[in-house]
Image (spheres, rainbow, N blue to C red):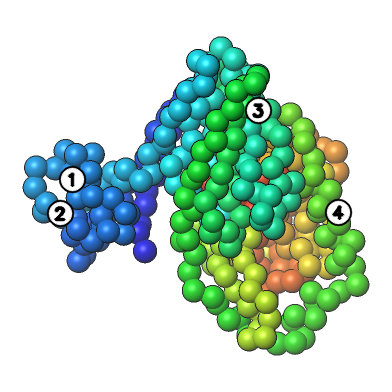
Amino acid sequence: MLRRVALPTLLLSLGCFALASLASAYVVQKGDTLYRIAARESVTVDELKRLNNLSSESLSVGQNLKLPSEAAKVVKLSGLEVEAPSVVRQGEAFSVRLRGARAAEARVRFLSETSEDVRSPAEDLAPFGAGGEYAVLGRVVLGQTKPLVYEVRLGSERITGSVPVKNTLGRVQNLNLPSSTTELLQDPGRAAEDALVEKAYARRTPQAWTKPFAFGNAIKVISSGFGQPRRYNKDAKITYHYGVDFPGKVGTPVLAINDGTVVIAGTYPVRGGLVVVDHGLGVVSLYFHQSKLAVKIGQKVTRGQKLGEIGTTGFSSGPHLHLEVRVRGEATDPADWFGKLLP
């Protein structure tokens, strides 16, 4: 699997941002050749050499290479400049960026969602921002492999674009959990719990954050990564890990990843001690399995504020924080958010 390191993104405060490159860097591994990397990325060796100013085809382990397949592509419409990623991966949060005097008038839809198992498919989205720099947030559903199709409309004009979706998920993990554990998923209270969370996903409030997202907890180890396909037992349906698990001692503070409003704070059969924060624009963060909660519904919170404490409540086999970041209800990789104002 390619090891990628995100390049820095230029950000401005108060909702304004620069239209920065979406390029990423690939770290050369032992056994890599320029030909093998080009084949994996579906590009030519000459493209890689030109992008990286290489005079030869020799590589060194640890060398950083720019990958052209990750560069943004820009199109124009009546003076409006539209920037979209040229490739996305399953579970990715991304931005379609709009620049120009009429950027605020444009509307964006993701037409491919009409054929996907997705919440609020092809929702008509108004861009947010200021000063001629605007954006719309997109998401790629886990398990989706067909190209993403977007539409940008400005008055009577419209353009569409197609973006390939990469499958970067690993092999299916068979957890083989005992029936005594999986029975928790059949708790009679689960339906009400899920319905409550779905209401949070349906919220569409103004952008509440003006600073990059940050994971302030002193937890550095991930016990279970985002997007892992899994079965609870050999006969079960394949599901995905919709968040990231951070193990920690019971009582370790759980901190808000950005500003927002608490819309759920309580203890539930599956998610255990749960806090959900609405950050606006259809973005919510969820914090599972807490032993104690430190906030109430309706409370405004700021980035880094304590929400509760790590525990092992609900469907949990040990003390940890399960963190999710959802865009209009669909799970996105938290790593796409940290250190950024926008993904």
Is 82 rendered above or below residue 323?
above
Q: Disc 4 or 1, which lies upstream in sequence?
A: 1
Is 325 rendered above or below residue 188?
above
Q: Tell me which corner region of the image, top left, top right, bottom left or bottom right, holds residue 261.
A: top right
Q: Tell me which corner region of the image, top left, top right, bottom left or bottom right, holds residue 20.
A: top left
Residue at the front extreme, as displayed: 156
Where disc 3 sits, the SS reads strand
Give the CA distance from mark 3 to mark 1: 38 Å
Give the CA distance from mark 2 to mark 3: 44 Å
Give the CA distance from mark 3 to mark 4: 29 Å
- The residue under the point 79% across, 74% down is 185
Q: Amino acid at mark 2?
A: Leu
Mark linked to residue 59: 2
The answer to whether residue 327 of the structure is visible from this angle is yes
Q: Which residue is mark 1?
A: 46
Q: Which residue is mark 3?
A: 107
Q: Which residue is mark 4?
A: 196
Residue at the left extreme, as displayed: 56
Give the CA distance from mark 4 to mark 1: 53 Å
Q: Position of residue 296 (x, y in %)?
A: 85, 44
- The residue under the point 90% across, 61% down is 192
Query: Alpha-carbon neighbours of circle 1 within 10 Å: few (<14), some, or many (≥20)?
Result: some
- Please identify, in this view, whether the residue under mark 3 or under mark 4 is nearer the observer: 3
Which of 8 and 290 lies nearest the eye of the viewer?
Answer: 8
Where disc 1 sits, the SS reads helix
Q: Disc 2 or 4, which lies upstream in sequence?
A: 2
